[in-house]
Image (tube, coloured by chain):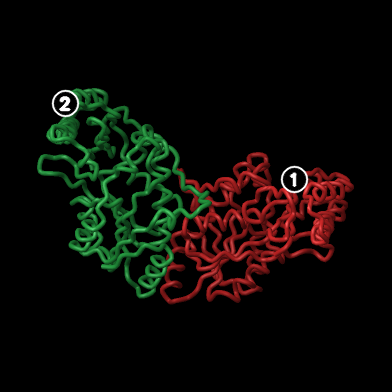
Chain colours: A green, B red
Amino acid sequence: MMVIRSCAEMSALAEQQRLQGNKIALVPTMGYLHAGHLSLVKVARQKADWVVMSIYVNPTQFGPQEDFARYPRDFDRDLQLAESVGTDLIFAPTDIEMYPPPHLTQVVVDKVTAVLCGASRPTHFQGVTTVVSMLFNIVKPHIAIFGQKDAQQAVVIRRMVADLHYDIQIIVSPIVREPDGLAMSSRNRYLTATQRKNAPVLYRALQKAKARIEGGENDPSAVQEEIRRTLTSVDEMRIDYVQIVDGETLQPVEKLDKEQNILLAVAVFLGNTRLIDNAIVYT
Amino acid sequence: MMVIRSCAEMSALAEQQRLQGNKIALVPTMGYLHAGHLSLVKVARQKADWVVMSIYVNPTQFGPQEDFARYPRDFDRDLQLAESVGTDLIFAPTDIEMYPPPHLTQVVVDKVTAVLCGASRPTHFQGVTTVVSMLFNIVKPHIAIFGQKDAQQAVVIRRMVADLHYDIQIIVSPIVREPDGLAMSSRNRYLTATQRKNAPVLYRALQKAKARIEGGENDPSAVQEEIRRTLTSVDEMRIDYVQIVDGETLQPVEKLDKEQNILLAVAVFLGNTRLIDNAIVYT
């Protein structure tokens, strides 16, 4: 498995692979890999000839009060894990490689970035779309794999790819969970033992809500209310949002309807740690 | 010469060309071709195996009070002219192909878009960078050729390409002028006979200023003042801006200096027609 730090070198290698007729898959990550990331590589491995994982903790997608500095990093462990599932190349650029000054360009997606996590993290998705666009231009993938755990990110990236006419197939791969239901996340390591024990309440609340909707409930506010009650039964739990939205526009749904692609999305703070989770209904 | 209207078809053809190892050049235009555009194709023809000209009057780079609706169009004549200089393919998409709703994504470049033409046309460059980014993703060129006539556009595109790590070589080709010095522009057709006779004053003012700086004048405001005086000696002439700026940052220059790449840039209204021109000093 190769490790590349330079954008120019990465770009040249990708060009070579494309000229040889090889299909390139990109799995963008911020490292500190867990089974969720590895499941993305496994999908990539099946679909492409050459699997590139980027490991880059992108500073521009963190707000000033957020956890950029303390975001967990373990590069050596990441290399072992990535190699174990068949990654061909790790692209791990430095900040100065990615954002040489003066860096003045942003890729901005409107509307779908203004809701849910975008409401609490106003510059987050602009950082994501800009860095993903940069990674697309450098790694030149035919396919890119994202996790459904970051449901809004997946919607935003699909929107950007369609709008800017990137010739890249976006695959969104299912959430990988711990045995007790907690969605895998690099941020789970921030949790205390008690918080970790309580964290699966997100999954349980979402599953109960999904079952209730599939059982015929058509009032979104009743379902949201029940999710809120379940979540706040847990110590140290503060709700950022609980929303039932259209799975493509991310706009609130007035009435639950079997014809619609519905996303149940929650974000909470458990102590100081922000956790997100979601469930898809009717697709 | 092929004519393609569909983004998907264009993208597939470009992919084929790349797989065959052919070098693709893109010449983006809004049509109503003149010798300036054709000079760009000639450069492209020398540098690439496959020359694509896009002809697309991009609505998003026109302001609400601007000339989008009456911008001159003559597609049949354009096809003849493009073919005469060796264009391989014309990409002429429709608006609905380029911007299928909901189109929510913009590519935005800061600072270098806020000055000169960007000050008078606040949404112009956002429209340009977005559409050029789309064209890059669809046509997948190795090289793209722009005209020095739109000096600020060239700077903005170079910035976007560097910032987003597009693996595309940008070539900026010299201004082509009428025998009397007027820079070729599709908008020259808006001029009345008298305006057309007076229009070369832009070129004369810039040449005089350039000679004065190269002769040792180091005060930019003195030079700007002289350009203004020369321009306003002409009937129906209203100045939008006369600026002496750094050729890369486009920020005003305090003192003229032989070490610096200096751009003299002017924009005027002659009657209702907006004309721009520029000169480079010391490079």
Q: Assign a secondary structure to mark 2.
A: loop
Q: Is residue B31 left or right of residue B184?
A: left
Towards the viewer: A75 or B145? A75
- Residue assigned mark 1: B241
Residue at (56% x, 72% y) in the render: B88
Q: Which residue is mark 2?
A: A234
Q: Chain of mark 2?
A: A
Q: Amino acid at mark 2?
A: Val
Q: For mark 2, does the 10 Å Cα neighbourhood hold few (<14), some (14 to 19), or many (20 or more) residues?
A: some
Label 1: chain letter: B
A140 and A75: which is toward the camera: A75
Compared across the picture, whether B58 is left or right of A63 comes to right
Instruction: Left or right? Give the position of A237 relative to B213.
Output: left
Q: Is residue B276 visible?
A: no
In percent of width and height, residue B132 lies at 54, 56
Image quadrant of residue B33? Answer: bottom right
Picture quadrant of residue B19: bottom left
- Say which element carries label 1: strand
Image x and y of residue A86, in percent: 21, 64
Quadrant (top left/top right/bottom left/bottom right) for the N terminus of chain A: bottom left
- Where residue A130 is drawn, which disc sits there? none
Where in the figure is residue B282, as x and y percent of width and height?
72, 63
Residue drawn at (53%, 73%) of the image: B50
Residue B171 visible? The answer is yes
Q: Residue furthest left?
A: A179
Vertical side of A146 occupied by A275: above or below = above
In this orientation, which residue lies closer to the viewer: A202 or B35?
A202
At label 1, the amino acid type is: Tyr
Q: Look at the image and tell me in which quarter the C terminus of chain A lies.
A: top left
